[in-house]
Amino acid sequence: MPQYRILKAVLDRRSVRKFDARSVEREKILACVEAARLAPSAENKQPWRFVVLEDAEARRQFAEAAFSGIYRPTRWALDAPVLVVLLAELNVVAHRLGRLIQGTQYYMIDVGIAGEHFVLQAQSLGLGTCWIGWFNARRAHRALKLPRKIKVCEILAVGYPASDLRPRQPKRKSLGDILFFNGWK
């Protein structure tokens, strides 16, 4: 298979949980958010919002709320130079009615697409990331003093990967296991 630029970023990307101590340049974070901003969304509602926590004290305070109790195993994320909290501003038609009619939370799909745009842009800039879904969403919401219509969806740990990380060895199903043309099996 030819090596296309996006495919190369996908192949090189891994979940990074150990980071170098150096800070991340703001222009790189802005480039990642710009990539996320350009993602498609249901009804073009663009529900994503981003809170970037680059200050050590802001990250610590957020982590005390979001990664406490049963979520304590996620405290490794405090070592990331940046935490990006992915939020959704819910729209009545596209998100609430869509969920009732289709049974699908479209804002989660939309935020997921935007987040993956962010992750792939970060990879192309030499940054490592890790999706974090194990956190206390209610306490994270309170810690950020968010209005009710804003939903905390995910967190991304972002930074330069530690130099002693092992190469990625993904275990993935083959195309033959997951791909069907013109119908199921």
Image (spheres, rainbow, N blue to C red):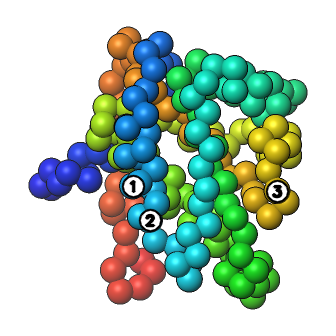
Q: CA distance from mark 3 to mark 1?
A: 25 Å
| Vertical side of 36 occupied by 13: above or below | above
| Vertical side of 158 occupied by 5: above or below | below
Q: Residue 39: which numbered mark, if any?
A: 2
Under circle 1, the secondary element is helix
Q: CA distance from mark 3 to mark 2?
A: 24 Å
Q: Amino acid at mark 2?
A: Ala
Q: In x, y percent, where is residue 101?
A: 75, 88
- The residue under label 3 is 147
Viewport quadrant of the C terminus: bottom left
Q: Is residue 83 left or right of residue 90?
A: left
Q: Amino acid at mark 1?
A: Ala
Q: Residue 35: which numbered mark, if any?
A: 1
First along the sequence among labels 3 and 1: 1
Under circle 2, the secondary element is loop
Asked if marks 1 and 2 touch (Cβ < 8 Å), the reply is yes
Q: In x, y percent, where is residue 157?
A: 55, 33
Q: Residue furthest left?
A: 2
Q: Is residue 1 left or right of residue 14?
A: left
Number of labels in the image equals 3
> Which residue occupies 43% across, 34% down?
26
> Which residue occupies 63% across, 19% down?
56
Q: Which class describes the residues within 10 Å of circle 3: few (<14), some (14-19), or many (20+)?
A: few
| Mark 3 vs mark 2: in front | 3
| Residue 178 in sight in this render | no
| Vertical side of 162 occupied by 59: above or below | below
> Which residue occupies 41% across, 22% down?
161
